[in-house]
Image (spheres, rainbow, N blue to C red):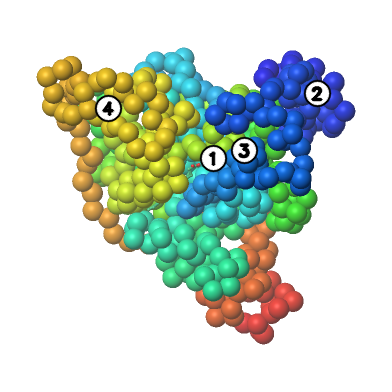
Amino acid sequence: MDLAVTRTLASMTSCNCSDPVSQQLHIFKLTHKIPAQLSLSYGSPVTVQQAASSLQTNLIRNPFFMETLAHLSIERIPERLVHAAGAGAFGHFRVTHDISHLCKAKLFSAIGQKTPVAVRFSHVGGFRGFADTARDGRGFAIKFYTEDGNYDLLALNTPVFPVMDPLFFASFAHALHPNPQTGIMENNAQWDFLTLRPESVLFAMVTWSDRGTPHGFRHMPGFGVHTFQVINHHGTPSFLRFHITPDAGLKNFMNEDAVRLAGEDPSYYARDLYNAIAYGCYPTWTVSAQILSLEQVKTASFDVFDVTKVLPTDKYPLQQIGILELNKNPENYFAEVEQIAFNPGNLVHGILGAPDKLFEGRLVSYLHDQAYRLNGNLNKIRVNAPLKPLSTYLRDGRSPVRDNELGAPDYFPNSFNGPVAFADEQAKLIEISQKETDNFGPAREFYLKEFTDKERETLPGNVVSGLRMVTCELQERVVKMFSKIDRALGSRIREGLNNSTNACGEM
Ligand code: HEM
């Protein structure tokens, strides 16, 4: 709905005009003057008697009662294994700077080229219904509906991931979730894991800084984290680390405000995004990349594919590619946000993925998770379907099947004009070998060069608040971990713990 309509309708409603989220039902009423005829799911109209009190009627013979209750039981689908809580919106990506000499993907083919997108923002560990401002990593997933099929770029608001080895992903996911015996969220497992896997130190530091409580999705950055390999029309590779920077500016909540808002308005981020779009105040982000040649990759003094480290921007400066704008709210949350499925393996010609092991591990995980929560025909769900009609050899299965490829042959090869593959030169990811390297040096550099004075100032207090109910042994380990980044930082955390109400005794 456009801005003028929203404003007019808002002024006609009796509820708070600054909040289109709260007006949604009023707006529906104003745009639907006459109620529709209530029907059963197979189309038969429901009578007034069937919809009235069931106290005096034979329940089993009331199809309206039977259908309503039966359907209620199947309303829930499994939530995402991670990133379960989220909000989404639609818009487009517009190319502002030409990189077609580096990447042949159609979405980057010319300046001005516009590609429709769907975006979902999420909590990393939080489940459905989690308070938006609770401290956590955040996801920023973009589905580009390109002429060549969908390209999914999954980003995080932290520039790094906690582990480089996919073997540890399941444990990290468990450590973020409730204790298996008590079912209660507490921080022991998280700090235990983070201090035992030293490569996660940068991720931990960013998440426990004020960046772990963004001021809303409109002020949140995204980082592609992997260094992606792309190729141009000659097959020449280049390597891109994506950065998505909010044009409204980076802004974070102080810990106290985030904690207060988690109680006052648990949907603060989602509401802010929806309202901004409803009022035509469309959020935009600048999409850039650090771009490396194959030569630069070969001569780098460190592993440029290590997802637990950033690439220094003084060495590999950001180069703008385009602008992402969100200008349309979902019309149905379940259909368009809950059922959207992003997969790092959804790549288009010209973008090969990333050569690191973590990326390889991800290729397995998303398919499993999505087949479990959405069934195998997930790309036939409207929000996941590509722009062009499908021509595959996939058939049948649980709904939705859409047109099920009509009469086309369902086997390959065939002599009856079933879909044929197109010719393209073979392009392969480069082969790399990875090993663990110094973790504290890069974290120290980030702490000193990338954090603002204010972020350095607030970090110890944030960490102390997260250690309140953690064992003394773990508190000690966390102090040691942060001391290795910066001795003064460790001392301030120690001091904060000694002064806190549940102090473990002088550390
Ligand atoms: C071994 C490493 C990883 C594994 C196994 C993994 C696995 C998963 C799984 C199973 C989901 C839920 C998928 C769904 O049900 O739709 C998910 C969601 C997500 N992952 Fe990962 N992930 C990994 C690393 C990463 C990294 C490095 C990033 C960012 C660069 C990332 C970004 C996201 C985002 C943004 C979502 C939410 C997508 C949405 O909004 O639906 N993940 N991940």
Quickly name the residue at label 3: 63
Labels 3 and 2 touching (C-beta < 8 A): no
Crowd tier of the residue under label 2, counting other residues whose Cα lies within 10 Å: few below 14, some 14–19, many 20 or above:
many
Quickly name the residue at label 1: 338
Q: Residue 406 carries which label?
A: none
Q: Is residue 205 left or right of residue 105?
A: right
Crowd tier of the residue under label 3, counting other residues whose Cα lies within 10 Å: few below 14, some 14–19, many 20 or above:
some
Taking depth in this image into account, of 98 and 336 the one nearest to the observer is 336
The type of residue carrying mark 4 is Thr
Quickly name the residue at label 2: 10
Quickly name the residue at label 4: 392
Labels 4 and 1 touching (C-beta < 8 A): no
Taking depth in this image into account, of 126 and 353 the one nearest to the observer is 126
- Could you tell me how far apart the alpha carbons at marks 3 and 1 are, in whole angstroms? 29 Å
SS at badge 4: loop
* Residue at the image point whose x is 51% and y is 47% from the top: 77
Q: Nearer the viewer, mark 1 or mark 2?
A: 1
Residue 369, relative to residue 464: is it above or below? above
Residue 470, relative to residue 60: is it above or below? below
Split into 4 quadrants, where in the image is the N terminus?
A: top right
* Residue at the image point whose x is 69% and y is 79% from the top: 503
